[in-house]
DNA sequence: GCCATTACATACCGATTGGTATGTTTGTGT
DNA sequence: ACACAAACATACCAATCGGTATGTAATGGC
């Protein structure tokens, strides 16, 4: 019997619950301060389950990066940019629409939080976070290049460099708004970034 | 006898040693993960000294913000900007020269690190860090306003908003370079920011 | 020169941490 | 139906955490 029984063991679902709870805990407290006990309390599971699915806290954290955060970025940024026929407009829409998630203003960007905390401390974290960053930059540079071919970005613009700067400013805006705890600052800051993106065309 | 004796007790110096060691520890590991034991090991002092000068770990951290980090920002940014007769050039010089400090690329901006870690968790930290951010933004907005009166910044530019964005991008560039562990990325990213500052004039 | 206070050092505490060893239940292949 | 492995739960561990209580040495006022 493969059909769902409520009391049945569902290892995949259990794993996902652990990943989601770990993501939330890490998003708020950072990786080092994230408490496994707290994560387990939020899932109703125990250490037996955790250490059955993940050999260590670090592996749990890396799995959060590779699976949870990767999926979020792919869905909200990478894929829309890649599939868009109007890359500049799509990028600006993404920058505008990001305010939809309220806890981004409260807790910041999960990827950037982990980068700032873990990159100097753990080479494994740094490499995986860096790989995600690279995909982000590539997706953006690709979008800018396509826009450039459409004549919506000036020819003298170095798209890779522009992409790097946009991401930097992007993360910077999220971080400042998080410190200010202000959605107003968030929007003001992103308006400037949207203007910058527009300035690449004129 | 007030003269310096090597074995004499010098409470001010002791306090400074604690603050400096705490700053270094926090800069690398963050506030939550900063170990008091490690800080004391780096000073040769003990808990008796620490808790004589600071009532708690939080007070130690807040003192690091109020005294150590404040002084660094004032010396390297606030004062140069305030006293400069050519604000735009001075700003660009600061952005260019920041690479002088190598551990900024390795460990990032101490202010931003603490903001990203502590703002959602501790209101006292958030307020003090926010106050420093506000002084930064004011110093930058002032400099841009003076440049605007000199005709070096376009009249339609909102200097306060531009200052907010510059700081965001500033911190973003430092953060990205720290994750990449690359002084090259650091310079590439800041070159874009310097171009942006220049674009305010033309 | 005495004395109170400052400026530390030493020893210890409960709480929490990540991790492990072992037990128990559930699913699966034959 | 039986065996075996997977999927958990329970109980426990050493290490480290921030913090405290107490003791001692140095300093400054009178």
Image (cartoon, coloured by chain):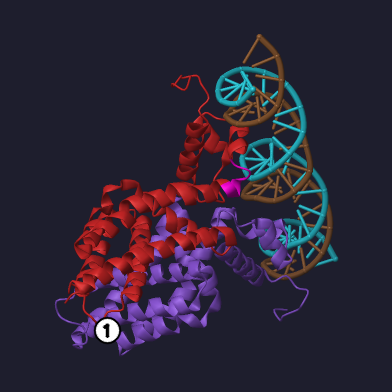
Chain colours: A purple, B red, C brown, D cyan
Task: Count neighbours of disc 1 (C-alpha within 10 A) and say few if under 14, some if 14 to 19, many if 20 or more.
Answer: some
**Residue A120 is at least partly visible in this image:** no
Subunit of label 1: A
Percent coordinates x, y for residue B57 in the rendering: 60, 46
**Which of A121/A48 is in front?**
A121
Residue A61 in the figure: left or right of residue B158:
right
Query: Where B51 sits versus A160, above or below?
Result: above
Percent coordinates x, y for residue A40 in the rendering: 69, 62
Q: Secondary structure at mark 1?
A: helix
Name the residue: 39% across, 55% down: B109
Name the residue: 38% across, 72% down: A170
Name the residue: 22% across, 61% down: B92
Residue that carries the numbered disc 1 in the rendered image: A198
Residue A133 in the figure: left or right of residue A109:
left
What are the residue bounds of the magenta stretch? B54-59
**Residue B64 is at least partly visible in this image:** yes
Question: What quarter of the picture does the C terminus of chain B occupy?
Answer: bottom left
Residue A5 in the figure: left or right of residue A185:
right
- Give the farthest residue toward the bottom: A85
Query: Where D24 sits versus B128, above or below?
Result: above
Instruction: Give the total number of marks visible in the rendering.
Output: 1
Percent coordinates x, y for residue A54 in the rendering: 60, 58
Q: Quadrant of residue B186?
A: bottom left
Q: Quadrant of residue A74?
A: bottom left
Is B106 contained in the magenta span?
Answer: no
Query: Where B90 sits versus C27, above or below?
Result: above
Percent coordinates x, y for residue A137 in the rendering: 32, 70
**Which of A157/B86 is in front?**
B86
**Which of C10/B155 is in front?**
B155
């Amino acid at each position: 019997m493969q059909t769902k029984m409520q009391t049945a063991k569902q290892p995949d679902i259990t794993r996902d619950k652990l990943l989601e709870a770990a993501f939330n805990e890490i998003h708020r407290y950072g990786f080092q301060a994230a408490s496994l006990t707290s994560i387990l309390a939020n899932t109703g599971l125990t250490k037996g389950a955790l250490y059955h699915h993940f050999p260590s806290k670090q592996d749990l954290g890396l799995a959060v990066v590779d699976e949870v955060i990767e999926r979020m970025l792919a869905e909200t940024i990478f894929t829309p940019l890649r599939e868009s026929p109007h890359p500049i407009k799509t990028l600006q829409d993404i920058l505008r629409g990001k305010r939809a998630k309220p806890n981004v203003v409260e807790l910041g960007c999960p990827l950037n939080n982990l980068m700032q905390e873990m990159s100097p401390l753990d080479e494994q974290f740094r490499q995986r976070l860096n790989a995600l960053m690279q995909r982000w930059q590539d997706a953006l540079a690709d979008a800018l290049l396509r826009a450039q071919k459409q004549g919506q970005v000036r020819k003298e613009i170095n798209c890779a460099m522009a992409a790097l700067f946009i991401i930097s400013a992007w993360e910077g805006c999220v971080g400042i708004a998080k410190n200010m705890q202000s959605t107003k600052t968030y929007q003001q800051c992103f308006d400037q970034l949207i203007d910058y993106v527009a300035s690449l065309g004129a």
